[in-house]
Image (cartoon, rainbow, N blue to C red):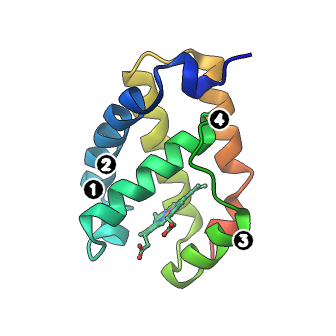
Amino acid sequence: MATMFERYGGFATVSKVVMAFYDKALDSDVIGVYFENVEMPALIDHQTKFISQVMGGPASFSDDVLERVHAPLKINGAAFDEMLSVLQETLEDFDMAEPDINTILGELRARRSRVVHA
Ligand code: HEM
């Protein structure tokens, strides 16, 4: 069975999704501020890992790493929810099938306690 990552065209597609997600995230009143002092390459790296991993792609990272990276950022529940809705909007813009979008959002929701620390 092909992963979602393969079915949607691998890194070529993910990089387009990443750019679109990145624009929306920076524009957001709720989460834009978290990314203000983050280096651009780190941000793009973040988004690429973020999207590839949840599509079953190769760029994997452990829940412990997620915890360690986000703990100092003091991300609250509202910011987490906003991140998910920005991502949902982006995936819809790319005409992904609803069950696939739900799989991706479910993967992220399952890691909420690793990311939210405020
Ligand atoms: C389940 C949801 C999330 C996942 C899977 C995720 C994943 C990641 C990953 C893989 C990294 C890079 C780690 C590395 O350095 O290798 C990262 C960094 C980061 N994340 Fe997330 N993230 C999530 C949610 C969020 C949310 C909700 C915010 C803010 C609203 C956020 C803000 C950041 C920032 C600012 C960095 C960069 C930290 C730095 O480089 O100084 N993340 N995230």
Q: Residues within 10 Å of mark 4 (few under 14, many from 20)?
A: some
**Three-letter code, disc 4:** Gly
Distance between the alpha carbons at the discs numbered 2 and 1: 6 Å
SS at mark 4 in the image: loop
Dot 3 or dot 2: first in sequence order is 2
Picture quarter with the N terminus = top right
SS at mark 2 in the image: helix
From what the image shows, is residue 84 above or below residue 2?
A: below
Image position, residue 41 (x, y; %)? 29, 62
Q: Can residue 118 be seen in the rendering of this structure?
A: no
Which residue position holds label 1?
A: 26
Q: Residues within 10 Å of mark 1 (few under 14, many from 20)?
A: some
The nearer-to-camera label among 3 and 2 is 3
Give the left or right position of residue 21, taking residue 75 as reference: left
Which residue position holds label 4?
A: 56
**Three-letter code, disc 1:** Leu
Dot 4 or dot 1: first in sequence order is 1
